[in-house]
C-alpha cells in the first residue's frame, strides 16, 4: 500500500488532473471449470467458517445454553436416534455426506458455532445432500419423524440464523455447488444453492458479467444463503436487491415437495410470485436448492476513491453531490468512521491510506462502460468536493491492487471488530438526516456507564462504539466490539437501540435478517397484522414447524 498516492495527491486542481483515476479495477480472475466451481479455492475467507474455527480455538468464549435464555427446546420435536442416522445413510449417495457426532464430535464444532461466536448449538448430525432429490428425501423423513432442521450455507450470518439452537439437524448445502447454465445473451445464471459467491462471480467475470451482489464474506458465503437471507452488500445502490435480480428458485418444502420455479424470464405475470416467499425467509419455509439470477454485464471502467472528511455533515454533502454529479455510474458510497479505521490499523498493522486519520472516511466507487467519460466525471467531482472543502483529503486507486487495498479498509471491518473477543452488532436502516446520530448517542450511553476500556484497558469489556455502513442505502452497522460478551453491555444496548430505531421509523434489520438475535424485537419494525400474516405463511408451508425453529419471528 506504500505505493498509494497520498494526501497531497488530490489537493489542488493540477494534482487532481495528474492523478487521473485508474482505468479499471478488474476482476479477481481465476480460471474455473463450469462445474463444481467451489473446487477452485475461494481466495478470501473474510468471515469464513474456517476463521470462526480459528477464533474459537484461540479465544475462550463461554458458550452454553445460556446463550439462548428465553427459549426452551420444543418438546414436539423427536430426539435423533441411531435408526434415524442409519436411515439418512441409506438416503444419501455418499458416506462423506454425513458428519455424525458419534464418529467425530469435533467435526461438528464449525457447524454448531456462528461467526460472531455468540451462538452455539448442540447438533449431533450434519447432512450434506448432493441434489434436490436428496434434500427432498431428508426433509420428508424429518417431517414424518418431527426432527427439526437448520439449513446452513457458508455459515457467515451475523444474527445466529444458520446455527442450531438445540439439537436440530444441520442440513448443509455445501455439496451442491455446480453451475447449471449461463446464457450470455440474457445474462441469466442458473446454479446450485451451495456455490460460493466468489466462485460464481469469478465464473461470470470470465464471461464478461458479474454477480449482482458483493460482500465481505464472498469467499465463504453461498449464493443460496445469500438469497435465503436477502443479503444486501456493497453495491445494492447500483444493482438493487435480490428481490429484483433473482428470477427464480428451486426449493424443497418440509414435506419433501420440490418446487421447481427456476424461471429465467424477466416477465412472468402468472399469479403469485412464489420465489419472493423464499427470498429472505431464512430457511423457515423450506430449503433453497437452486437459483436463477439476472447478472449484469461487467463494467470495463471502475474507479475507486477513498476520502477523509471532518464531520458527518461533510459526508452528507459529499453524498448528495456524488449522486448528482456521478449519477448512474456511482456503484458504492461506503462510510467508515475514524474509530473503525483505527481498529483496522491496529489489528492489521497496515498504514492508514491518507497521511491523517479523519473523523469520517468514505469509499466511493464508479462503474461504467466509458473510461474517458467516467474519469472526466470523477475528476470534475473531485475538483469540486476538494475546492468546496467538503472533502479534506483523499486518494484514488491507480490500479486494481490499490483498489483492493482500499476496499480492505472497508471490507475488513467485521474482522477488526471481532478481534478482541466478540462484538455486539446492529444492522439498521435509518433516514440519512439522523444516520450517524445513533452512534453518537450510543457512545454517550457507554461513556456514562463507564464500560469502555478502549484497546488498552483490559479490565473493561467494551473496546468502543463504532459505525460504518452502506450510506448509499441508508444502512448503518453499529458495532460494539467487546473483550467478552457481558450482560451489562447487552442490557444497555437492548432494547435501547431498537427503541431508538422505532422512534425514527427505521428498520431493526437492513440486510442481515432476523435469525435468533432479533426474533424477540421484530415488533419494533413490523406490526401485529404483518406478523400475523407471516405466521400464517409459515404455518402453511411448515405446519409442524421443523424448519429452522426458534428463529425469525415468535410463533405465538
Ligand atoms: O459486521 C457487520 O456489522 C457488518 C457486516 C457487513 O454487512 C458489512 O457491510 O461489513
Ligand atoms: Zn453490510
Image (spheres, rainbow, N blue to C red):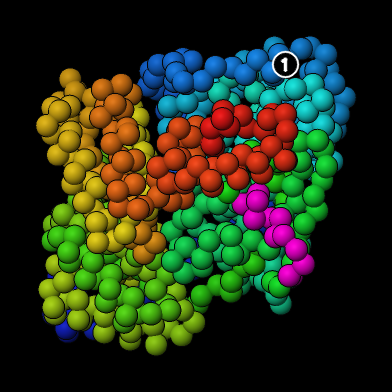
Does any portion of residue 311 appear in the rendered image?
Answer: yes
- In this rendered view, identify the residue nearer to me: 532 or 459: 532
Q: What segment carries the magenta color?
A: 268-279
Above or below, comparing residue 139 to residue 505 in the picture: above
**Residue at the image position 30 percent from the left and 52 percent from the top:** 504
Q: Position of residue 53 (x, y in %)?
A: 49, 27
Q: Quadrant of the N terminus?
A: bottom left
Hey, which quadrant is residue 166 in on the image? Answer: top right
528 or 14: which is nearer to us? 528
Residue visible at 15% across and 60% down in the picture? 311
Q: Mark 1 points at which residue?
A: 78
**Type of secondary structure dominating the magenta stretch:** loop
Q: Give x and y (percent) for residue 305.
A: 30, 68
Spot the residue most to the front.
Answer: 529
On the image, the x and y values in percent for residue 324 come to: 32, 80
Left or right: where 93 falls relative to 264: right
- For residue 432, above or below residue 533: below
276 part of magenta stretch: yes
Residue sitting nearer the eye, 301 or 424: 424
The quarter holding residue 59 reads: top left
Q: What residue appears at the point 51 percent right and 26 percent down from the top-left corner?
A: 113
Amino acid at each position: 500500500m506504500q505505493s498509494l498516492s497520498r494526501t497531497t495527491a488530490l489537493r489542488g486542481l493540477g494534482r487532481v488532473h495528474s492523478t487521473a483515476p485508474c482505468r479499471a479495477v478488474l476482476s479477481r480472475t481465476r480460471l474455473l471449470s463450469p462445474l463444481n466451481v467451489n473446487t477452485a479455492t475461494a481466495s478470501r475467507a473474510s468471515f469464513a467458517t474456517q476463521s470462526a474455527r480459528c477464533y474459537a480455538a484461540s479465544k475462550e468464549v463461554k458458550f452454553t445454553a445460556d446463550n439462548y435464555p428465553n427459549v426452551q427446546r420444543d418438546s414436539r420435536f423427536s430426539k435423533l436416534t441411531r435408526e434415524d442416522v442409519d436411515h439418512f445413510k441409506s438416503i444419501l449417495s455418499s458416506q462423506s455426506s454425513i458428519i455424525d457426532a458419534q464418529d467425530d464430535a469435533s467435526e461438528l464444532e464449525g457447524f454448531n458455532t456462528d461467526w460472531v461466536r455468540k451462538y452455539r448449538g448442540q447438533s449431533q448430525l450434519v447432512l450434506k445432500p448432493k441434489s434436490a432429490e436428496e434434500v427432498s428425501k431428508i426433509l420428508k423423513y424429518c417431517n414424518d419423524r418431527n426432527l427439526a432442521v437448520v439449513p446452513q450455507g457458508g455459515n457467515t450470518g451475523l444474527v445466529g440464523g444458520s446455527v442450531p439452537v438445540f439439537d436440530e439437524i444441520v442440513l448443509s448445502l455445501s455439496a451442491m455447488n455446480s453451475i447449471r447454465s449461463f446464457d450470455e445473451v440474457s445474462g441469466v445464471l442458473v446454479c446450485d444453492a451451495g456455490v460460493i459467491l466468489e466462485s460464481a462471480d469469478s465464473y461470470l467475470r470470465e464471461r464478461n458479467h458479474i454477480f449482482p451482489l458483493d460482500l465481505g464474506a464472498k469467499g465463504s458465503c453461498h449464493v443460496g444463503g445469500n438469497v435465503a437471507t436477502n443479503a444486501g452488500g456493497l453495491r445494492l445502490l447500483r444493482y438493487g436487491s435480490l428481490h429484483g435480480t433473482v428470477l427464480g428458485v428451486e426449493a424443497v418444502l418440509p414435506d419433501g415437495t420440490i418446487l421447481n420455479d427456476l424461471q429465467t424470464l424477466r416477465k412472468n405475470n402468472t399469479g403469485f410470485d412464489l420465489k419472493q416467499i423464499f427470498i429472505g425467509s431464512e430457511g423457515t419455509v423450506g430449503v433453497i436448492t437452486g437459483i436463477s439470477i439476472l447478472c449484469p454485464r461487467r463494467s470495463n471502467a471502475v474507479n475507486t476513491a477513498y476520502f477523509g472528511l471532518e464531520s458527518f455533515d461533510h459526508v452528507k454533502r459529499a453524498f448528495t453531490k456524488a449522486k448528482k454529479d456521478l449519477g448512474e455510474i456511482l456503484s458504492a458510497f461506503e462510510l467508515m468512521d475514524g474509530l473503525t479505521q483505527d481498529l483496522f490499523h491496529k489489528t492489521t498493522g497496515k498504514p492508514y491510506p491518507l497521511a491523517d486519520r479523519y473523523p469520517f472516511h468514505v469509499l466511493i466507487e464508479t462503474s461504467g462502460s466509458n473510461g474517458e467519460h467516467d474519469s472526466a466525471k470523477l475528476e470534475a467531482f473531485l475538483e469540486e468536493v476538494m475546492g468546496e472543502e467538503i472533502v479534506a483529503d483523499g486518494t484514488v486507486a491507480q490500479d486494481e491492487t490499490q483498489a483492493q487495498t482500499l476496499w480492505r479498509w472497508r471490507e475488513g471491518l467485521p474482522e477488526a471488530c471481532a478481534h478482541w473477543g466478540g462484538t455486539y452488532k446492529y444492522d439498521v436502516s435509518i433516514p440519512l438526516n439522523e444516520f450517524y446520530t445513533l452512534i453518537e448517542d450510543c457512545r454517550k450511553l457507554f461513556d456514562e456507564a463507564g464500560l469502555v476500556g478502549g484497546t488498552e484497558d483490559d479490565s473493561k469489556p467494551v473496546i468502543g462504539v463504532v459505525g460504518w455502513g452502506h450510506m448509499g442505502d441508508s444502512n448503518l452497522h453499529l458495532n460494539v466490539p467487546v473483550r467478552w460478551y457481558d450482560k451489562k453491555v447487552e442490557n444497555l444496548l437492548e432494547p435501547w437501540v431498537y427503541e431508538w430505531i422505532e422512534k425514527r421509523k427505521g428498520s431493526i434489520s437492513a440486510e442481515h435478517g432476523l435469525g435468533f438475535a432479533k426474533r424477540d424485537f421484530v415488533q419494533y419494525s413490523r406490526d401485529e397484522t404483518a406478523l400475523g400474516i407471516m405466521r400464517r405463511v409459515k404455518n402453511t408451508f411448515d405446519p409442524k414447524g421443523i424448519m429452522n425453529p426458534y428463529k425469525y419471528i415468535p410463533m405465538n
